[in-house]
């Protein structure tokens, strides 16, 4: 079974600065997808960014980018020019690309990001 | 386009009571999921379904039941509620393509007292 580990329960960043959230995972599969979800106080789960394991190029979405290290099984999220609206719980998640078994998402325990003025 | 709709948003149950959490999606997704979120624990999969009439257990299924009679609906039944079932429950849906990710409902906060 796959596992996802987020070792930083809380992180803080100053507004306009850059912060990196860490995520590691364990799998024996070679084809899979990785995701970062944001959960603001509203509780709604919002997809931030996704990465396909067979693509070496790191995904980027505006101020959000990832550092995907497949051999190290590491998938960190970098937030540039942090804004107050970035304050939220961030979850890293893994999804197998193998058809069957429901393609379930496995989540990490989350990192609570605080953005300070 | 409503996406994934969960009802109710909040509920307080007494120990031993039963209830059904409703989940409906209008995107014609074939896969649907129920997760529970506890502080510091992330989201744990309770049950999932890959299509109408097909359901399977996830990581934490005890105390819950599901059914999937239509593509759109995936209700979660709690029988004999216990304090350990106090949690936030999320329903989600997706196409079968793994790369797309889930669409989540807004969650149900359930307290069992």
Image: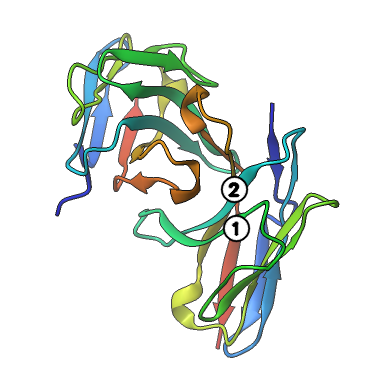
Residue B76 quadrant: top left
Q: Is residue B41 above or below residue A100?
A: below
- Tell me what residue is drawn at x 24 percent, y 39 percent: B10
Left or right: A33, with A101 as reference point: right
Task: Quickly name the residue at label 2.
Answer: A33
Q: Which mark is residue A69?
A: none
Q: Which mark is residue A51?
A: 1
For the N terminus of chain A, which image quadrant? top right
- Place of residue B24 in the rendered image (x, y in percent of width and height, measured from the top left): 19, 35
Residue furthest right in the image = A72
Q: Is residue A108 visible?
A: no
Specify the subunit that label 1 lies on: A
Secondary structure state at the residue bearing disc 2: strand
- Place of residue A51 in the rendered image (x, y in percent of width and height, measured from the top left): 60, 58
Disc 2 residue crowd, few under 14, some 14–19, many 20+, Cα 10 Å: many
Relative depth, front residue between B92 and B106: B92
Q: Which comes before the other along the chain, label 1 or label 2?
A: 2
Left or right: B70, with A44 as reference point: left
Q: Is residue B55 above or below residue B9?
A: above
- Place of residue A16 in the rendered image (x, y in percent of width and height, measured from the top left): 58, 90
- Tell me what residue is drawn at x 63 percent, y 43 percent: A32
Q: Are marks 1 and 2 in contact (CB under 8 Å)?
A: yes
Specify the subunit that label 2 lies on: A
- Tell me what residue is drawn at x 41 percent, y 29 percent: B86
- Place of residue A100 in the rendered image (x, y in percent of width and height, measured from the top left): 50, 24
Q: CA distance from mark 1 to mark 2?
A: 6 Å
């Amino acid at each position: 079974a796959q596992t996802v580990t987020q070792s930083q329960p809380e992180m803080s960043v100053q507004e306009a600065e850059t912060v990196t959230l860490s995520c590691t995972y364990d799998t024996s599969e070679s084809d899979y997808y990785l995701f970062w979800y944001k959960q603001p106080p509203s509780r709604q789960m919002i997809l931030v960014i996704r990465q396909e394991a067979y693509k070496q190029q790191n995904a980027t979405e505006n101020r959000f980018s990832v550092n995907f290290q497949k051999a190290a099984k590491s998938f960190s999220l970098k937030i540039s020019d942090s804004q107050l609206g970035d304050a939220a719980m961030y979850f890293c998640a893994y999804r197998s690309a193998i058809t069957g078994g429901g393609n379930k998402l496995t989540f990490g325990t989350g990192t609570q990001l605080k953005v300070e003025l | 386009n409503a996406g994934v709709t969960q009802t109710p948003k909040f509920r307080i149950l007494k120990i031993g009571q039963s209830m059904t959490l409703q989940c409906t999606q209008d995107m014609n997704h074939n896969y649907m999921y129920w997760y529970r979120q506890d502080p510091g624990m992330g989201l744990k999969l309770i049950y999932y379904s890959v299509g109408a009439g097909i359901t399977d257990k996830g990581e934490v299924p005890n105390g819950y039941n599901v059914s999937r009679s239509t593509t759109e609906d995936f209700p979660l039944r709690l029988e004999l509620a216990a304090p350990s079932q106090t949690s936030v429950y999320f329903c989600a849906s997706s196409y079968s393509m793994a790369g797309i990710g889930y669409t989540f409902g807004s969650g149900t906060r359930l307290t069992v007292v």
